[in-house]
Image: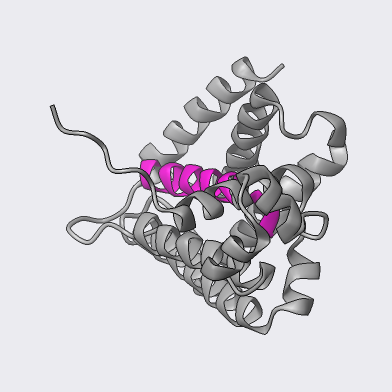
């Protein structure tokens, strides 16, 4: 029977840091807190990471890899509304998993030039994917909009998705991290963004949108 190799200390530090950043916010989490929770000395932590910014940048690298892997336009066929729905779910799942980036975004970017530059690239990538999905639907006569409208639509999709968790946090900060609230918040976010696309949809996609909207309204409290 094979024995699993123990996870590296560096990976455990990143996993724990992500949990603490998400729970308490990055500004309120110190390297001393991380070391105490890990039950290691500060010196051991600094052996793996120079400072807290180094931890944040490493987490952001993981986040960036996942964004580029998960958010894509189909290459072998034209996209459909299900691809848009899947794209939105992936966006919100990643935003929730790394929610401290979004909750503390303005503060983080003001202090971290590396993060500022890379987050701009992520927003551009998300807009490009949203635009590609809309273009694909338009090519199949499933979406009626000129290029100017599609550009605005792609940007609006990313703006709402980027700040949706901040909106949910303001609505109910005391219960923000509860599992059921998280699930409801992500479902509301997906529907809210999809509703931006709804008025432009035609044919089969319009029918599918109405079904998704009906299902969403049934499940919402």
Q: Which of 115 and 2 is in front in this view?
A: 2
Quadrant where the C terminus sits is top right
Is 52 displayed left or right of 9 in the figure?
right
Q: Percent from the top left, x then y, of residue 79?
A: 31, 53
Q: Residue at x 46, y 53 (%)?
A: 9
Secondary structure of the magenta portion, mostly? helix
Q: Percent from the top left, x then y, of residue 61?
A: 48, 68
Picture quadrant where residue 5 is located: top left
Is 168 displayed left or right of 78 in the figure?
right
Q: Percent from the top left, x then y, of residue 114?
A: 61, 81
Q: Which of 146 and 136 is in front in this view?
A: 136
Is 167 displayed left or right of 116 in the figure?
right
| Res 105 seen here | yes
Q: How many labels does the image show?
A: 0
Examine the structure image and report whether residue 167 is included in the region drawn in magenta.
no
Task: Identify the magenta region.
Answer: 82-101
Is 10 displayed left or right of 50 in the figure?
left
Picture quadrant where residue 29 is located: bottom right
Quadrant where the N terminus sits is top left
Examine the structure image and report whether residue 93 is included in the region drawn in magenta.
yes
Q: Residue at x 40, y 53 (%)?
A: 8
Q: Residue at x 61, y 46 (%)?
A: 38
Q: Which of 209 and 122 is in front in this view?
A: 122
Q: Residue at x 81, y 60 (%)?
A: 27
């Amino acid at each position: 029977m094979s024995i699993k190799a123990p996870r590296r200390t560096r990976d455990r530090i990143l996993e724990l840091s992500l949990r603490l950043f998400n729970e308490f916010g990055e500004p309120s989490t110190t390297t001393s807190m991380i070391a105490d929770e890990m039950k290691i000395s500060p010196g051991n932590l600094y052996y793996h990471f120079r400072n807290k910014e180094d931890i944040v940048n490493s987490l952001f690298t993981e986040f960036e890899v996942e964004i580029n892997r998960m958010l894509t336009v189909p290459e072998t066929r034209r996209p459909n509304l299900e691809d848009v729905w899947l794209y939105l779910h992936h966006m919100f799942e990643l935003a929730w998993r790394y929610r401290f980036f979004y909750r503390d975004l303005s503060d983080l970017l003001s202090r971290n030039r590396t993060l500022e530059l890379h987050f701009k690239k992520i927003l551009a990538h998300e807009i490009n994917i949203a635009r590609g999905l809309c273009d694909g639907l338009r090519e199949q006569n499933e979406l009626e909009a000129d290029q100017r409208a599609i550009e605005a639509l792609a940007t609006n999709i990313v703006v709402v998705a980027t700040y949706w968790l901040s909106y949910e946090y303001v609505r109910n900060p005391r219960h923000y991290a509860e599992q059921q609230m998280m699930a409801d918040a992500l479902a509301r976010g997906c529907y809210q963004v999809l509703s931006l696309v709804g008025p432009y949809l035609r044919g089969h996609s319009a029918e599918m949108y109405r079904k998704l909207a009906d299902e969403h309204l049934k499940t919402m409290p």
